[in-house]
Image (spheres, rainbow, N blue to C red):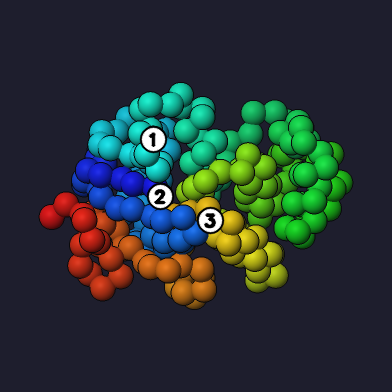
Amino acid sequence: MLRVRDLVRPGLEPVTLGIAQGECVALVGPSGSGKSLLLRAIADLDPNQGEVSLGDTRREDMPAPQWRRRVAYVPAESGWWADDTGAHFPERERTVALLARMGLAETILASPVARLSTGERQRLALVRALLVEPEVLLLDEPTSGLDQAAAGHVETILRECLDRDAAILMVTHDPEQAERLARRQLTIEGGRIRDGEGAAPEGASQ
């Protein structure tokens, strides 16, 4: 279980929440409300304070790269450290299998990153995260640049992750997607988190 207690950073009021194994939680709210800030804080990519743990292991008790393999953050627009797409995917066989399930051909690995569409980069970033088999996925609008068919491929794979007991915290502006995938919904406004009915989530700071 991912546990967050009194997590705070500039632009974000103290957040307390828990996400169980096999649970998807949808995070919704207007632009600039703090959704991406929360995901980045949990991933420890920006300075923050508070308690974050995975199971019985506190975030500060493991090296940052190990934490980010177990708790993988996939932003709406991921960074790429090489011009060649294939350079980001050393495990060719597993990569190709996931690409096919995402509706992508193996030949995409020979394309320069600069020539990829937004939707192709989104799916490739998710493949990159899934290859390390994280216990938690922090997803920022994972299907925003995709057509209905491609989004369906992604949602199918995310359901399989949930079936394998991964936990997902997902930012989405699509209420139907939240309904399809999420067990519960949290709303964030002005950096303060609320559940879908407007009450603070159980265990949250008031």
**Residue at the image position 37 percent from the left and 52 percent from the top:** 35
Mark 3 sits on what residue?
Answer: 165
Furthest residue in direction front, as rendered = 56
**Residue at the image position 25 percent from the left and 33 percent from the top:** 49
Q: Residues within 10 Å of mark 1 (few under 14, many from 20)?
A: few
Mark before the other along the chain sequence, 2 or 3 = 2
Residue 178 locus on image (x, y percent): 46, 69
Q: CA distance from mark 1 to mark 2?
A: 10 Å
Residue 54 locus on image (x, y percent): 40, 41
- Residue type at mark 2? Met
Q: CA distance from mark 2 to mark 3?
A: 10 Å
Q: Are marks 2 and 3 in contact (CB under 8 Å)?
A: no
Residue 25 locus on image (x, y percent): 41, 61
Mark 1 sits on what residue?
Answer: 57
Residue 105 in view in this figure: yes
Q: CA distance from mark 1 to mark 3?
A: 17 Å
Asked which quadrant contains residue 189, the reply is bottom left
Label 1 residue SS: strand
- Residue type at mark 1? Thr
The answer to whether residue 152 is left or right of residue 103 is left
Label 2 residue SS: loop
Mark before the other along the chain sequence, 1 or 2 = 2
**Residue at the image position 72 percent from the left and 39 percent from the top:** 113
